[in-house]
Each structure stands twice: as structure tokens, then as C-alpha cells.
Amino acid sequence: MDETALRKQIPDSVLPYPKGPYNRSKYLFWRIIYPLHNTGRDALLATGVIRHPYPSGRQDFILGNLVASRSVEDFVEYLGTQGFFNHFIAWRDSGEIVSVRRPVSFEWQYHLRIFADGEVRGHYEYTPESHPVWHMREVGQEERREEFLEFLGDWIVPVLASAFASACRED
């Protein structure tokens, strides 16, 4: 299955409806701009107004690699059973074929990326809908490695903790 078909197979993530008028107004705002977001983001990247924050093209927090005997399509289907769905408004990292998130609340999410070479990376962070600037600047972003490994079960071959730390520094 090609990358575009795979992305279309994944249902879009939906954030829980927030409490409070301020967060509800942000929720409504994002519901309106979702259809325009990717075009706007790509235009701002192309013109240099914003830049991808990673020179290597991949964010930190490598978790491991997809088990060789398993397909990305089956992995994505499994992730759906764990509450991970399409995160279409995220940055596109180099070699990324899938970006999914598992919302915890309107404010927080687990974000997971799968790459064409089988690498899997993930982090815990603010949702872009709740705090767009903090999200973009990675304020509050955390590794949460053990929680991710629990979600992922035997679908990936984890990198060793020392290799994990080294890979994050090298990228």
C-alpha cells in the first residue's frame, strides 16, 4: 500500500470537547481551520516564514524499529485499537509515512511517527489546538518512553536506552 493510501485509511484524530469558554473557543477555531491548515503550513514553510525545527528532519525520541515480519498497515490498524489516529496537522518529518496521536485531553497527547525505514519515534506534548505556540516550540514535550513501549507491545524492537539517548543527541 502506498503512503497516501495508508494515510487515507487512518481515521482522523478527534480531540475531546474541552471545558471552559476559552478552550471551547479554541476548539471551535480549529474545527474551522482544519481544512486550510496543511496548505497554510506548507506555504509558510516554502516561503521561509517558518522552518522545520530539526536540521536532520526528524524529531527526537526514537523508540525502536517495526518488527521486520510485520507490516506498517497492520501496525497502524493495531495502533487504532490503542487510541492512535491520524495527526494530519503535525510537521512532516523526513522519511515519515505515518503520524498518529492519542489524545489524553484537549491539552495533551501522545504523538507517534512511523518512517519508511521502519523507525518509530514518539513523544508526549501539548496538542497544537490547545497551545499552538507552546506546541511548536516544544514547551512541555516529554519522552514518556516506558508508556510508549507499553502501548506498542511486541510490534517494535526497542532501541536500548543508551542508544536511544545517543540517537536523540545525534539527530
Image (cartoon, helix red, strand yellow):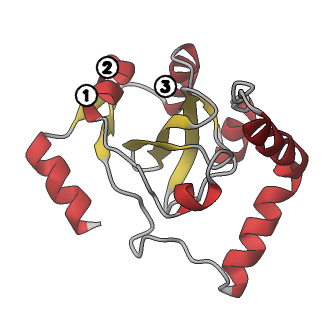
> Image quadrant for the N terminus?
top right
The local secondary structure at tag 2 comes to helix
Residue 159 at x, y = what percent? 19, 40
Tell me the kind of residue under disc 2.
Glu
Residue 17 at x, y = what percent? 75, 25
Instruction: Say few, some or many: other residues with alpha carbon within 10 Å of mark 1 (under 14 / 14 to 19 / 20 or more).
Output: few
Q: CA gap, disc 2 to disc 3?
A: 14 Å
The local secondary structure at tag 3 comes to helix
In the picture of the structure, the residue carrying the numbered disc 2 is 150
- Labels 3 and 1: the sequence-earlier one: 3
Q: CA gap, disc 1 to disc 2?
A: 6 Å
The correct choice, above or below, for 54 with respect to 97 in the image is below
Residue 63 at x, y = what percent? 29, 40
Q: Which mark is residue 75?
A: 3
Q: CA gap, disc 3 to disc 1?
A: 19 Å
The local secondary structure at tag 1 comes to helix
Residue at image position (59%, 58%) is: 91
- Labels 2 and 3: the sequence-earlier one: 3
Residue at image position (49%, 40%) is: 111
Tell me the kind of residue under disc 1.
Glu
Q: Which mark is residue 146?
A: 1
